[in-house]
Image (cartoon, helix red, strand yellow):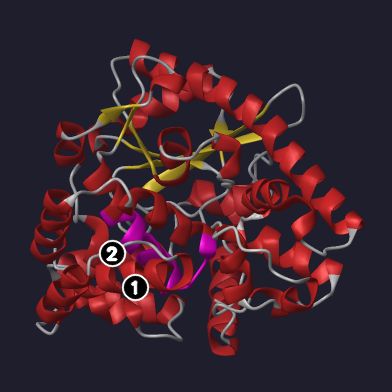
Amino acid sequence: MSEARAVAGRPAGVPLPALAALLRGEPVPWSEVGGDADRLLGALADQGLIPLVHRQLKRLGRTIDWPEAVGRSIGEGAAAAAAAELLARRELVRVVGALAGAGIEPLLLKGTALAYRYYADPSLRPRADTDWLIRDEECDLVRAVMAELGYAPALLCDGELVFRQFELQRTDPWGFTHAMDFHWRISTQVVFADLFSYRELRQRAEPIAALGPEARGCGVLDALLLALIHPVMHHRAELRLIWTYDVHLLAQQLDAAGWSELVELACRKRVGRVAAWGLEAARRYLGTPVPPSVLEQLREVSSRQEPSAHYLTPGGGWVTETVANVRHLGSWRDRLRLLREIAFPSAAYLLRAYRLDHFPMARLLLPALYVHRGVRGAARVLRGHK
């Protein structure tokens, strides 16, 4: 699931360098962030920075000339994030325990894993959902366990090739919705889907003690490479500072040997140019101490053909990604299957999408629903809205 709404590195008109300077702990004048409270608050929310900026404002104290009302609003947002995190943590411990009780050993990925392993407080790392990696043969068992915990499927298109994940949601008694996104491949994009296997990541996994004895997340090198490719494989190289801050924290865990291992891993996985892009952004915006030799080596190897580098090209969208997926699938059988899954999702999904799943005779309408969905989808593609 996407966490981002900012566009092309210009969040609601507030300059990225000013927001990055705040993250570095610099007293940025009010005029440099635009002098518009609503625009700033919107940009901080879009970039996922409200809790981090609140922490920096507390450290800066009276050395910053921002209006008191803005500081109060940011403080309220940070307090809300902290309260939500208490509910999220309680639920995560419950889910980890239930899955472990069924013999399932998932890996926590991306935001949640990073929040509990590398951030000073997990509420400093906002995220829309929790991502897990599971074995593909465990999908039905995971669904059954989660159903017992009160989770139901979110309305997302299904299909083994088109999505490679499923989302389950539950709203707790306090009205907080917990979204759990279970992946059986790293990405929906074919170029990245098999970058890491579950077994490979599990072998190097590390405990996340705060979420229970069974909780595991990726090792630091794997976590860093995933953080570097995430904005590229799912968001067309969108520069979002919370993702760059993930890279910043992870990169600081590496010594000289670790940097050498990262270069070797990125090159072996054929994502050298993508990794260089992410590390350069962290160095430029947050002052991340990336050894120059690392960038040189990644750029040197990236001069070779890397299919993943195509995703650094700006302006891509659903059509571009679909064409890339079709091109990189290994057989015509899989290509046709992917196109079928896109054009003709399951009847169960279609009835739920049209809110007809509780009507006994609704299946008689399926031909008309498929036609309507196809026409509407084609119109969205032509308008550039898909």
Is 343 placed left or right of 121 in the picture?
Answer: left
Q: Residues within 10 Å of mark 1 (few under 14, many from 20)?
A: some
Q: Given contact means CB atoms under 8 Å apart, are the residues at marks 1 and 2 in contact?
A: yes
Q: Main secondary structure of the magenta part?
A: helix
Q: In the rendered view, would you say 105 is above or below 308?
A: above
Query: What residue is at 32 percent from the left and 74 percent from the top?
Result: 277
**What amino acid type is highlighted by mark number 2?**
Val
Query: What residue is at 46 percent from the left and 45 percent from the top?
Result: 111
**Label annotation for residue 280:** 1
Give the CA separation, mark 1 to mark 2.
Answer: 8 Å
Q: Residue furthest front?
A: 63
SS class, disc 1: helix
Q: Is residue 62 magenta?
A: no
Q: Is residue 230 magenta?
A: yes
The residue wearing badge 2 is 290
Query: Which residue is nearer to you in this view: 41 or 321?
Result: 41
Is 161 placed left or right of 346 in the picture?
Answer: left
Q: Which span of residues is magenta-colored?
A: 225-241
x, y (%) of residue 76? 81, 43
